[in-house]
Image (cartoon, rainbow, N blue to C red):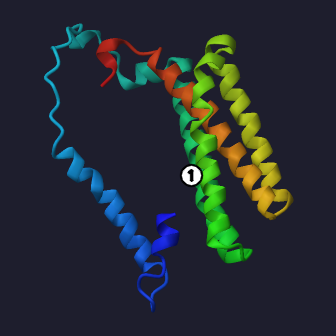
Protein backbone atom coordinates (compact mmCIF):
# COMPACT_ATOMS: atom_id res chain seq x y z
CA UNK A 1 0.00 0.00 0.00
CA UNK A 2 2.85 2.38 0.75
CA UNK A 3 4.31 1.72 -2.69
CA UNK A 4 0.91 2.27 -4.28
CA UNK A 5 0.22 5.54 -2.43
CA UNK A 6 3.71 6.97 -2.99
CA UNK A 7 4.21 5.94 -6.63
CA UNK A 8 3.09 9.31 -8.08
CA UNK A 9 4.86 11.67 -5.65
CA UNK A 10 7.37 12.58 -8.37
CA UNK A 11 5.21 13.25 -11.41
CA UNK A 12 7.84 12.69 -14.09
CA UNK A 13 9.27 9.56 -12.45
CA UNK A 14 6.81 6.78 -11.76
CA UNK A 15 7.65 4.67 -8.66
CA UNK A 16 10.54 6.85 -7.45
CA UNK A 17 8.30 7.91 -4.57
CA UNK A 18 7.60 4.24 -3.83
CA UNK A 19 11.29 3.44 -3.50
CA UNK A 20 11.93 6.48 -1.31
CA UNK A 21 8.96 5.64 0.95
CA UNK A 22 10.11 2.02 1.25
CA UNK A 23 13.67 3.19 2.00
CA UNK A 24 12.29 5.33 4.84
CA UNK A 25 10.32 2.37 6.17
CA UNK A 26 13.43 0.22 5.98
CA UNK A 27 15.50 2.79 7.92
CA UNK A 28 12.78 3.49 10.50
CA UNK A 29 13.72 0.56 12.78
CA UNK A 30 17.11 2.24 13.33
CA UNK A 31 15.27 4.96 15.24
CA UNK A 32 13.54 2.41 17.44
CA UNK A 33 16.72 0.40 17.98
CA UNK A 34 18.50 3.45 19.41
CA UNK A 35 16.18 3.16 22.42
CA UNK A 36 16.73 -0.58 22.83
CA UNK A 37 18.64 -1.46 25.97
CA UNK A 38 19.20 -5.20 26.25
CA UNK A 39 19.29 -6.64 29.73
CA UNK A 40 22.45 -8.46 30.57
CA UNK A 41 21.84 -12.17 30.38
CA UNK A 42 23.45 -14.64 32.69
CA UNK A 43 26.40 -16.45 31.24
CA UNK A 44 25.24 -19.77 29.89
CA UNK A 45 27.37 -22.59 31.18
CA UNK A 46 28.47 -24.54 28.17
CA UNK A 47 30.51 -27.64 27.71
CA UNK A 48 34.11 -27.23 26.70
CA UNK A 49 34.83 -26.23 23.14
CA UNK A 50 36.34 -29.67 22.51
CA UNK A 51 32.87 -31.23 22.88
CA UNK A 52 31.44 -29.16 20.05
CA UNK A 53 30.97 -30.93 16.76
CA UNK A 54 32.42 -29.46 13.59
CA UNK A 55 30.18 -28.28 10.77
CA UNK A 56 30.96 -31.45 8.84
CA UNK A 57 30.00 -33.61 11.81
CA UNK A 58 26.75 -31.65 12.18
CA UNK A 59 25.98 -32.08 8.48
CA UNK A 60 26.49 -35.84 8.76
CA UNK A 61 23.32 -35.92 10.85
CA UNK A 62 20.55 -36.58 8.27
CA UNK A 63 18.01 -34.56 10.28
CA UNK A 64 20.25 -31.48 10.32
CA UNK A 65 20.81 -31.87 6.60
CA UNK A 66 17.08 -32.33 5.99
CA UNK A 67 16.31 -29.20 8.00
CA UNK A 68 18.86 -27.03 6.17
CA UNK A 69 18.04 -28.27 2.66
CA UNK A 70 14.28 -28.02 3.25
CA UNK A 71 14.48 -24.50 4.65
CA UNK A 72 16.72 -23.38 1.77
CA UNK A 73 14.35 -24.97 -0.75
CA UNK A 74 11.33 -23.29 0.85
CA UNK A 75 13.00 -19.89 0.88
CA UNK A 76 14.35 -20.11 -2.68
CA UNK A 77 11.06 -21.17 -4.28
CA UNK A 78 9.03 -18.67 -2.28
CA UNK A 79 11.40 -15.79 -3.06
CA UNK A 80 11.50 -16.61 -6.76
CA UNK A 81 7.73 -16.90 -7.24
CA UNK A 82 6.81 -14.01 -4.95
CA UNK A 83 9.27 -11.71 -6.73
CA UNK A 84 8.18 -12.78 -10.21
CA UNK A 85 4.44 -12.48 -9.56
CA UNK A 86 4.15 -8.66 -9.43
CA UNK A 87 6.26 -8.36 -12.58
CA UNK A 88 4.11 -10.95 -14.34
CA UNK A 89 0.84 -9.47 -13.14
CA UNK A 90 1.57 -5.78 -13.60
CA UNK A 91 4.02 -5.60 -16.49
CA UNK A 92 3.21 -8.66 -18.57
CA UNK A 93 -0.53 -9.18 -18.06
CA UNK A 94 -1.74 -5.62 -17.36
CA UNK A 95 -3.25 -6.04 -13.90
CA UNK A 96 -3.49 -2.91 -11.77
CA UNK A 97 -1.04 -2.22 -8.99
CA UNK A 98 -3.96 -2.55 -6.56
CA UNK A 99 -4.76 -6.08 -7.79
CA UNK A 100 -1.12 -7.02 -7.61
CA UNK A 101 -0.80 -5.71 -4.05
CA UNK A 102 -3.89 -7.66 -2.93
CA UNK A 103 -2.31 -10.88 -4.22
CA UNK A 104 0.96 -10.14 -2.39
CA UNK A 105 -0.85 -9.14 0.82
CA UNK A 106 -2.88 -12.35 0.87
CA UNK A 107 0.28 -14.30 0.08
CA UNK A 108 1.83 -12.83 3.23
CA UNK A 109 -1.28 -13.82 5.20
CA UNK A 110 -0.81 -17.33 3.77
CA UNK A 111 2.80 -17.27 4.96
CA UNK A 112 2.11 -16.38 8.57
CA UNK A 113 -1.52 -17.19 9.53
CA UNK A 114 -0.96 -20.97 9.40
CA UNK A 115 1.68 -20.51 12.11
CA UNK A 116 -1.21 -20.59 14.58
CA UNK A 117 -1.63 -24.31 13.85
CA UNK A 118 1.65 -25.43 12.27
CA UNK A 119 3.23 -26.23 15.64
CA UNK A 120 0.28 -28.42 16.60
CA UNK A 121 0.43 -30.19 13.25
CA UNK A 122 4.14 -30.84 13.74
CA UNK A 123 3.48 -32.33 17.19
CA UNK A 124 0.71 -34.52 15.84
CA UNK A 125 2.25 -35.71 12.54
CA UNK A 126 5.98 -35.03 12.88
CA UNK A 127 8.39 -32.70 11.15
CA UNK A 128 8.96 -34.76 8.01
CA UNK A 129 5.27 -35.21 7.19
CA UNK A 130 4.62 -31.47 7.48
CA UNK A 131 7.69 -30.72 5.33
CA UNK A 132 6.40 -33.14 2.69
CA UNK A 133 2.90 -31.64 2.95
CA UNK A 134 4.41 -28.22 2.28
CA UNK A 135 6.25 -29.62 -0.74
CA UNK A 136 2.98 -31.04 -2.11
CA UNK A 137 1.33 -27.65 -1.60
CA UNK A 138 4.27 -26.08 -3.47
CA UNK A 139 3.69 -28.55 -6.31
CA UNK A 140 0.04 -27.49 -6.58
CA UNK A 141 1.14 -23.85 -6.54
CA UNK A 142 3.60 -24.38 -9.40
CA UNK A 143 1.14 -26.43 -11.47
CA UNK A 144 -1.56 -23.82 -10.93
CA UNK A 145 0.85 -21.07 -11.98
CA UNK A 146 1.42 -22.81 -15.33
CA UNK A 147 -2.31 -23.27 -15.89
CA UNK A 148 -3.64 -19.73 -16.25
CA UNK A 149 -2.73 -16.11 -15.57
CA UNK A 150 -6.07 -14.82 -14.25
CA UNK A 151 -6.42 -12.79 -11.05
CA UNK A 152 -8.04 -15.68 -9.19
CA UNK A 153 -5.28 -18.03 -10.31
CA UNK A 154 -2.53 -15.66 -9.18
CA UNK A 155 -4.33 -15.21 -5.86
CA UNK A 156 -4.83 -18.92 -5.25
CA UNK A 157 -1.32 -19.93 -6.26
CA UNK A 158 0.31 -17.23 -4.11
CA UNK A 159 -1.77 -18.19 -1.08
CA UNK A 160 -0.72 -21.81 -1.64
CA UNK A 161 2.86 -20.62 -1.95
CA UNK A 162 2.58 -18.91 1.43
CA UNK A 163 1.04 -21.92 3.17
CA UNK A 164 3.58 -24.29 1.62
CA UNK A 165 6.42 -22.02 2.72
CA UNK A 166 5.03 -21.90 6.25
CA UNK A 167 4.80 -25.68 6.54
CA UNK A 168 8.28 -26.30 5.16
CA UNK A 169 10.11 -23.42 6.82
CA UNK A 170 8.57 -23.73 10.29
CA UNK A 171 9.04 -27.51 10.29
CA UNK A 172 12.62 -27.22 9.07
CA UNK A 173 13.70 -24.58 11.55
CA UNK A 174 12.10 -26.37 14.49
CA UNK A 175 13.70 -29.64 13.35
CA UNK A 176 17.10 -27.96 13.24
CA UNK A 177 16.76 -26.69 16.81
CA UNK A 178 16.15 -30.24 18.03
CA UNK A 179 19.32 -31.59 16.45
CA UNK A 180 22.19 -29.60 17.84
CA UNK A 181 23.52 -29.26 21.35
CA UNK A 182 22.97 -26.16 23.41
CA UNK A 183 26.63 -25.20 23.20
CA UNK A 184 26.55 -25.49 19.37
CA UNK A 185 23.70 -23.09 18.73
CA UNK A 186 25.85 -20.12 17.75
Which residue position is annotated with label 1? 79
Q: Say which residue appears at 38% left-offset and 25% top-offset.
A: 55
Q: From the viewer's side, name the closer residue of 54 and 29.
A: 29
Please indicate whether residue 44 sits to the left or right of residue 112 in the image: left
Residue furthest bottom as drawn: 12
Residue furthest front as drawn: 5
Q: From the viewer's side, name the closer residue of 29 and 49.
A: 29
Q: Residues within 10 Å of mark 1 (few under 14, many from 20)?
A: few
Q: From the viewer's side, name the closer residue of 171 and 96.
A: 96
Residue 93 percent coordinates (x, y):
74, 74
Q: Is residue 3 above or below residue 145?
A: below
Q: From the viewer's side, name the closer residue of 14 and 57.
A: 14
Residue furthest right as drawn: 147
Residue 80 percent coordinates (x, y):
60, 55
Q: Say which residue appears at 51% left-offset and 31% top-offset.
A: 68
Q: Is residue 173 above or below residue 183?
A: below
Count of all numbered marks drawn on residues in the image: 1
Residue 51 percent coordinates (x, y):
28, 9
Displayed quadrant of residue 128:
top right
The C terminus, quarter of image: top left
Q: Say which residue appears at 76% left-offset and 35% top-offset.
A: 136
Q: Is residue 7 above or below residue 157?
A: below
Please indicate whether residue 167 sits to the left or right of residue 6 in the image: right
Disc 1 is placed on an element classified as helix
Residue 173 percent coordinates (x, y):
50, 27
Q: Is residue 177 above or below residue 79?
A: above
Q: Say which residue appears at 80% left-offset and 57% top-offset.
A: 152
Amino acid sequence: NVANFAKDIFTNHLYVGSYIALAILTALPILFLTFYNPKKKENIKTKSIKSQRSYIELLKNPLVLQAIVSAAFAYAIMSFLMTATPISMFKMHGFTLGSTSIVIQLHIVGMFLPSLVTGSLIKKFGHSKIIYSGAVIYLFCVLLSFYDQSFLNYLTSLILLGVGWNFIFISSTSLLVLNYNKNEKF
